[in-house]
Amino acid sequence: MKSNKNNQLSLAERVRPTQARAVETREKILAAAAQLLEESGVDGLTTKKVAELAGVRIRSVYRYFSNKLAIVLALAKQTTLTEEALFDVYKDLENPDKNWKPALHELIDAIYLIGNEIPGLKAIRAAMQASPELRAVDAAMNERHAEALCQALLKRKANISSQKAMAAARTVIETSTCMLDLAWFESQRPEGAENAALLLEELKTMASAYLAVYLPS
């Protein structure tokens, strides 16, 4: 228990800059780390390489981050901030006057497109399984999506209890996360775009068929 707490402390960001120059330095560090992750994955990421690519001193990196996983944690948190805009799409899922299937498909496409634009996403997603704190960031965002989907099911008067609605929502979100990861990873391969598109279509078919058990057409 104690070692887990120490691990969480070691990944915590040491200083959150407020002055413009310091903010710029931190952003350079994160941009460099994302580029290195894109090029060589988490195994090729070191604080020394980050400092060299960012054009800053190594002590500047350690001023903000204790190690490379702390940098990955900051990048992971950035990806969740990018997802914030997606929660507006749930309004269409909640609206009983709108067809829920196109809204669901739009949400899946939006998450995929946003993720595809994030440098180093594949490595970030893989690295997020490297520690409890990194996994917690992913789990927290999945829980928010599940809660939003659960509310959409209930507002559409789905033939389901609130407890069952949350279980169904978690099933859809957790499954979708795995499938989206596969699509993102596939898209990074040479000529993998077609396979990624097929995975997305299968995800839409699966999620729609599952939710159709509880929602009217």
Image: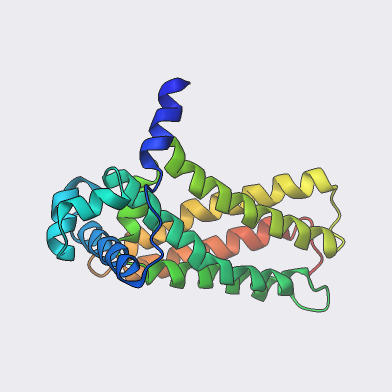
46, 174: nearer the viewer: 46
Horizontal arrangement in the rendering, residue 6 relative to residue 108 (left or right): left
User: Residue 126: image x %, image y %?
Assistant: 35, 48
Image quarter where the C terminus lies is bottom right
**Can I make out residue 103 in this image?**
yes
180, 18: nearer the viewer: 18
User: Residue 152: image x %, image y %?
Assistant: 76, 63
**Can I make out residue 41 in this image?**
no
Query: Measuring 33% from the left and 71% from the top, which residue is drawn there?
Result: 193
Q: How many marks?
A: 0
Horizontal arrangement in the rendering, residue 125 relative to residue 140 (left or right): left
Residue 133 location, quadrant: top left
User: Residue 82: image x %, image y %?
Assistant: 49, 67
Query: Measuring 24% from the left and 57% from the top, which residue is drawn there?
Result: 37
Q: Residue furthest bottom?
A: 97
Horizontal arrangement in the rendering, residue 81 relative to residue 71 (left or right): right
From what the image shows, is residue 50 above or below residue 28? above
Q: Residue furthest top?
A: 1
Horizontal arrangement in the rendering, residue 69 relative to residue 136 (left or right): left
From what the image shows, is residue 103 above or below residue 202? below
145, 157: nearer the viewer: 145
User: Residue 69: image x %, image y %?
Assistant: 31, 44
Query: Measuring 62% from the left and 49% from the top, which residue is drawn there?
Result: 143
